[in-house]
Amino acid sequence: IHTGEQPYRCRKGLKSFNDRSNLISHERLHSGVKPFKCGECGKSFKLNSYLIRHQKIHAGEWPYKCPDCGK
C-alpha cells in the first residue's frame, strides 16, 4: 500500500525517505565516504550511480562532447 509515509529522516538535512536504502545513499553525500572505486583509474565516488556514469568515460560511451573540439 502506498501511504506516502516517509519515516526515514536525514539527520543533517530536511529530507525524508520512504525506504531506508535511499536514506543511506543520501547520507553518504554528507559523510564524505566514497565506497565505490573505479577499477580503471582508482577514482572513488559517493554513489554507485556516479561510478557507473564515470566508467562510461573509460568505455568511450560518454554521451557528451565539446562542441568546439569534439572531445
Image (cartoon, grey):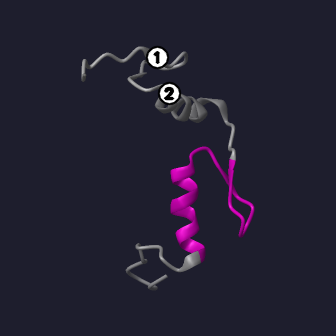
Q: Is residue 56 left or right of residue 38?
A: left
Instruction: Tell me the residue that label 1 is attached to.
Output: 9
Range of magenta residues: 36-58
- Report which quarter residue 54 is drawn in: bottom right
Whether 25 is drawn above or below 34: the answer is above
Q: Nearer the viewer, residue 52 or 32?
A: 52
Residue 39 placement, left or right of 70: right
Q: Residue at x 60, y 75 (%)?
A: 58
- Which corner quadrant of the image does residue 59 belong to? bottom right
Residue 54 inside the magenta-drawn segment: yes
Q: Residue at x 54, y 15 (%)?
A: 11
Question: In the rendering, at what x and y percent does residue 38 appear?
Answer: 68, 61
Q: Which image quadrant: the N terminus?
A: top left
Are there few (<14), some (14-19), or many (20+) residues within 10 Å of tag 1? some
Q: Which residue is depicted at the point 51% across and 61% down?
A: 53
Check the image and name the residue furthest to the bottom: 69
Q: CB of mark 1 within 8 Å of CB of mark 2?
A: yes
The CA distance from mark 1 to mark 2 is 7 Å
Q: Position of residue 4 (x, y in %)?
A: 26, 20
Residue linked to disc 2: 23
Is-magenta flag for residue 69?
Answer: no
Which residue is depicted at the point 69% across and 45% down? 35
Q: Earlier in the sequence, mark 1 or mark 2?
A: 1
Q: Amino acid at mark 2?
A: Leu
Instruction: Report the side of 10 relative to 32 (left or right).
Output: left
Quadrant of the rendered image containing residue 43:
bottom right
SS of the residue at dot 2?
A: helix
Amino acid type at image mark 1? Arg
Q: Residue furthest right?
A: 42
Against 38, residue 58 (above or below) is below
